[in-house]
């Protein structure tokens, strides 16, 4: 294990359903913030279909 900080090149979303909490990749950087916002808006959990995804930090 390493404590090094790694700059991730992906945007991940977490399912808005706390019981699911599935995390998946929404976008790959570099990408305009507008595009990311659009993808987040459209993002639905691939596991349970919940459409209130939130940005995850990973
Ligand atoms: Zn889900």
Image (cartoon, grey):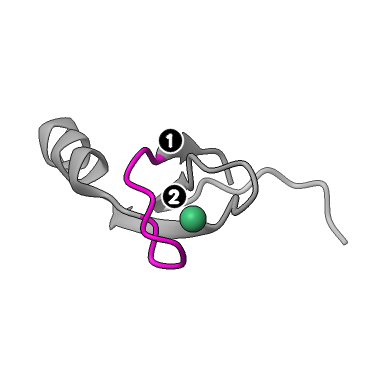
Using the image, determine if residue 25 lies above or below residue 6. Answer: below
Using the image as rendered, state which of residue 8 and residue 53 is in the foreground: 53
Q: Residue at x 14, y 39 (%)?
A: 38
Q: Residue at x 53, y 43 (%)?
A: 17
Dominant secondary structure, magenta: loop
Crowding at dot 2, Cα within 10 Å, few <14 / some 14-19 / many 20+, comes out as some
Using the image as rendered, state which of residue 56 and residue 9 is in the foreground: 56
Using the image, determine if residue 15 lies above or below residue 25. Answer: above
Alpha carbon separation for disc pair 1 and 2: 9 Å
Q: Which mark is residue 54?
A: 1
Which residues lie in the magenta part?
Answer: 45-53
**Of label 1 and label 2, which has the lower sequence position?**
2
How many badges with numbers are in the image? Answer: 2
Q: Residue at x 48, y 47 (%)?
A: 15
Find residue 37 and report its horizontal and vertical position in percent.
20, 34
Q: Residue furthest right?
A: 1
Residue 46 part of the magenta-drawn span:
yes
User: Toward which corner of the image does residue 35 lie, by quadrant?
Assistant: top left
The residue under label 2 is: 12
Tell me if the residue at label 1 has its CB under 8 Å from ligand 1.
Answer: no
Position of residue 50 in the picture relative to residue 57 (left or right): left
Q: Secondary structure at mark 1?
A: strand
Position of residue 16 in the picture relative to residue 31 (left or right): right
């Amino acid at each position: 294990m390493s404590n090094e900080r790694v700059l991730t090149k992906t945007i991940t979303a977490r399912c808005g359903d706390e019981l699911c909490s599935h995390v998946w990749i929404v976008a790959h950087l570099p990408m305009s913030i507008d595009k990311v916002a659009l993808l987040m808006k459209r993002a639905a959990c691939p596991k349970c279909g919940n459409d209130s995804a939130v940005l995850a930090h990973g």
